[in-house]
Image (cartoon, grey):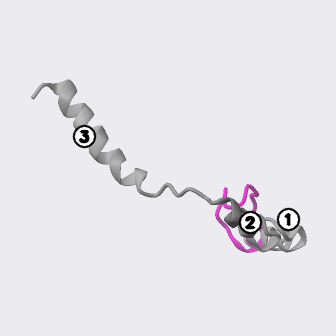
Amino acid sequence: MKAAQKTILMALSLLLPLAGGCEMVKPWQREALADPIMQPGRNPIGAAQLDHVYFSREAASGGASVGGGGCGCN
């Protein structure tokens, strides 16, 4: 086997399992998916509170695009 054929075969073998995850959404299922309860950012006040908790308690940088110390005195 040539190197190009091996590369194509390897790429196909890696990408083939990903094709099984595609699902077609039927028109009558779109209503349930468009429900506000399904939206991750449906509560901006709750999201702001969680961001504040991560900001003040996590000493890691880059967690929720905020930085600072873990003492909460920022």
Q: Is residue 61 magenta?
A: yes
* Residue assigned mark 2: 69
Neighbor class of circle 1 (other Cα within 10 Å; few <14, some 14-19, many 20+) is few
Q: CA distance from mark 2 to mark 3?
A: 46 Å
Neighbor class of circle 2 (other Cα within 10 Å; few <14, some 14-19, many 20+) is some
Residue 6 placed where, x, y %? 18, 33
Contact flag, marks 2 and 3 (Cβ < 8 Å): no
* Residue assigned mark 3: 10
Side of 35 relative to 2 (left or right): right
Inspect the image, locate mark 1, and give the three-letter code of the amino acid beneath it: Asn
Which sits earlier in the primary sequence, circle 2 or circle 3? 3
Mark 3 or 1: the one toward you? 3
Query: Would you place residue 70 above or below residue 14 in this image?
Result: below
Inspect the image, locate mark 3, and give the three-letter code of the amino acid beneath it: Met
Which sits earlier in the primary sequence, circle 3 or circle 1? 3
Query: Would you place residue 61 above or below residue 7 in this image?
Result: below
Q: Residue at x 24, y 32 (%)?
A: 7
Which corner quadrant of the image does residue 57 belong to?
bottom right
The magenta segment is 54-69
Which corner quadrant of the image does residue 17 belong to?
bottom left
Q: Residue at x 68, y 66 (%)?
A: 29
Given residues 59 and 4, the one toward you in this image is 4
Q: Is residue 9 magenta?
A: no
Given residues 18 and 44, the one toward you in this image is 18
Q: Quadrant of the C terminus?
A: bottom right
- Disc 3 is placed on an element classified as helix
Q: Which mark is residue 74?
A: 1
Given residues 47 and 72, the one toward you in this image is 47
Contact flag, marks 2 and 1 (Cβ < 8 Å): yes
